[in-house]
Image: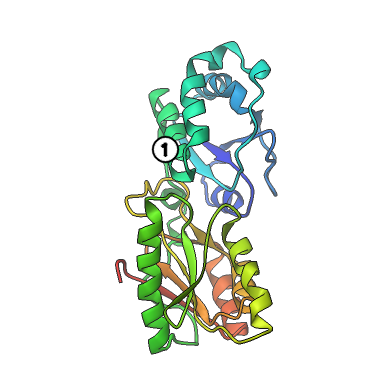
């Protein structure tokens, strides 16, 4: 049986919709899923109890999907089953996003669960190489994409983000704690002063474990890119999830943006 450890956003729902049998759904109490009703709610302070419950429900596979933020830990709420995990949980909370999730996966694997990626359940979330839209990227967009790939590679060791905005070879913004939407919103004020052009580039970190935290785009990303004054979106093949591919393409066409799925490295 599969358990979906889900956060917020549209991805957990897409996974459930594509499962032959409904998975068991668990979520952190502090981060209620947007569309799904959890079977189990837990806190990090009761993670050991969650692992016990999953075993009781005969869960063998676990998939992490959806966004969360780092919860505050209340030491008084740590239960007996979680005491042995306190050191690992503490380590995860001081790591970057990638490091923190890696520690959490190790906890689940040591408990005997097989951790799988969202793309194993819904392979259609990874579109093929090529330009998906009516609009094609220009030569400068290709150059900006190459620059974007180099920026993501440089950011990887810092473990801070998986996206950047590039125009005419210049780095306009890099993704950090606030996520892609926050990064793009930071550009909207500049659009009033001058047209930016350029691309949103998204790709996984170097040597990232692709079973978790793959970057993603959805229909709303297209409007954010348009509002930021960019010309299109470049994503790395097999490294970025696209939610509702047909809807994303239709929205990009409506907004006269391009979406280019490129091989990596450029």
Please name the residue that numbered disc 1 is placed on: 102
Q: Is residue 33 left or right of residue 120?
A: right
Q: Nearer the viewer, residue 152 or 45?
A: 152
Q: How many labels sit on residues?
A: 1
66 vs 13, nearest the viewer: 66
Q: Is residue 34 above or below residue 73?
A: below
Percent x, y of residue 106: 40, 30
Picture residue at 54% right of the left edge, 76% below the top: 249
| In the image, farthest residue toward the left | 265
**Mark 1 nearby-residue class (10 Å; few <14, some 14–19, many ≥20):** some
Q: On the image, which quarter does residue 148 sit in? A: bottom left
Q: Is residue 261 left or right of residue 224?
A: left
Asked if residue 88 can be seen in this view, the reply is: yes
The x and y percentages for residue 107 are 44, 27
Front residue of this view, candidates 173 and 228: 173
Residue 10, percent from left and from top: 62, 55
């Amino acid at each position: 049986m599969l358990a979906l450890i889900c956060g917020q956003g549209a991805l957990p729902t897409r996974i459930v919709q594509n499962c032959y049998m409904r998975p068991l759904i668990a979520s952190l109490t502090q981060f209620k899923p947007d569309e799904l009703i959890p079977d189990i709610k837990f806190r990090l302070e009761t993670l050991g109890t969650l692992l016990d419950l999953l075993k009781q429900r005969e869960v063998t596979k676990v998939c992490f999907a959806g966004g969360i933020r780092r919860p505050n830990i209340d030491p008084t709420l740590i239960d007996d089953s979680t005491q042995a995990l306190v050191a690992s949980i503490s380590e995860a909370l001081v790591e970057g996003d990638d490091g923190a999730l890696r520690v959490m996966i190790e906890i689940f694997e040591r408990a005997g669960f097989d951790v799988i990626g969202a793309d194993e359940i819904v392979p259609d979330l990874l579109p093929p190489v090529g330009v998906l839209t009516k609009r094609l990227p220009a030569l400068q967009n290709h150059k900006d994409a190459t620059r974007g790939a180099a920026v993501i590679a440089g950011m990887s060791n810092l473990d801070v983000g998986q996206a950047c905005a590039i125009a005419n070879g210049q780095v306009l913004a890099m993704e950090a704690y606030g996520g892609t939407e926050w990064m793009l919103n930071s550009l909207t004020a500049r659009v009033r002063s001058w047209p930016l052009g350029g691309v949103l580039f998204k790709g996984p970190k170097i040597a990232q474990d692709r079973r978790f935290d793959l970057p993603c785009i959805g229909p709303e990303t297209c409007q954010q890119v348009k509002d930021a004054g960019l010309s299109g979106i470049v994503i790395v093949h097999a490294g970025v999830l696209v939610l509702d591919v047909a809807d994303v393409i239709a929205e990009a066409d409506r907004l006269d943006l391009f979406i280019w799925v490129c091989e990596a490295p450029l």
